[in-house]
Amino acid sequence: MAKLYHVPLSPFCRKVRLSLAEKRIECELVEERYWEPSPDFLRRNPAGKVPILRIDDKTLTESSAICEYLEEAYPQVSLLPKTADARFEVRRLVSWFDDKFHHEVTSKLVYERVNKKLMKQGYPDSKNVKAGARAIKFHLDYMAWLLERRKWLAGEQMSLADFAAAAHISCLDYSSDVDWNRSEVVKDWYAKIKSRPAFRSILADQVPGFPQSAHYSDLDF
């Protein structure tokens, strides 16, 4: 069985969890407090980051590289389309969410409100929280623009781009930081995503001291 060292509200860990679950790869989840690195943790990844996936007698790090490995090693359920152009669009959007969305939204809201408390780093920076609350509106509008033209974010088939986006959105939704009244098409997309069997373990996540929002695990909101 594979083993994933993760943090529940890490979008990068969640992206890997979704890929593993969609491909029906059995995986043991081991919560890793990366801000309190142990010698064993640093041996697994000297960079001191999660996720870390132990699979096929290999230790893999960096979420996008892990997902690409899973695509090549376990292609029976593909999360990348066949053509070069379509694959480019998926990879572009994965990068968008893991870079731009992460720095403008996730790090400003989830990391300020949750991670700081868990790491005992003080109180949230109100300027960052306000900046994140403003930025998410732009990103939700961009997602709506895409979904008004496509069935899924990157095209006509669900892909790793949808899982990357849903990984970030689900972390924010855990603490009610997503305005679901802003876009019906984005709300419908997320309802489809979180209804998939691959999402079950994510909807069951519990972070001590931070209860789920009332609708978080409700498939019909």
Image (cartoon, rainbow, N blue to C red):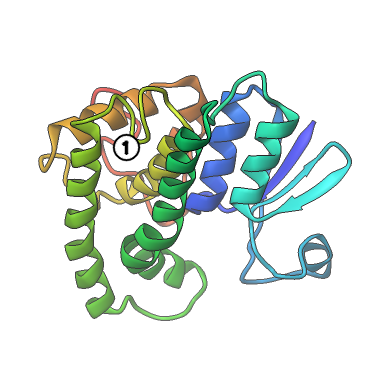
The quadrant holding residue 133 is bottom left
What residue would you read off at disc 1?
Answer: 216
Q: Residue at x 29, y 43 (%)?
A: 213
Does residue 204 appear in this view? no
Q: How many marks?
A: 1
The one nearer the camera, 23 or 50, is 23
Which residue sits furthest right? 57
Does residue 199 appear in this view? yes
Is 136 rendered above or below residue 85?
Answer: below
Q: The N terminus lies in which quarter of the figure?
A: top right
Residue 163 percent coordinates (x, y): 45, 37
Residue 113 percent coordinates (x, y): 35, 66
Q: Residue at x 34, y 46 (%)?
A: 169
Q: Is residue 76 left or right of residue 196?
A: right
For mark 1, give the secondary structure.
Answer: loop
Q: Residue at x 32, y 37 (%)?
A: 216
Is 200 rendered above or below residue 38?
Answer: above
Residue 40 percent coordinates (x, y): 83, 63
Is 59 rendered above or below residue 199?
Answer: below
Q: The C terminus lies in which quarter of the figure?
A: top left
The quadrant holding residue 173 is top left
The one nearer the camera, 39 or 65, is 65
The one nearer the camera, 119 or 70, is 70
Neighbours of disc 1 within 10 Å: few (<14), some (14-19), many (20+): many
Q: Is residue 207 left or right of residue 38?
A: left
Q: Residue at x 33, y 23 (%)?
A: 192
Identified by mark 1, the residue type is Tyr
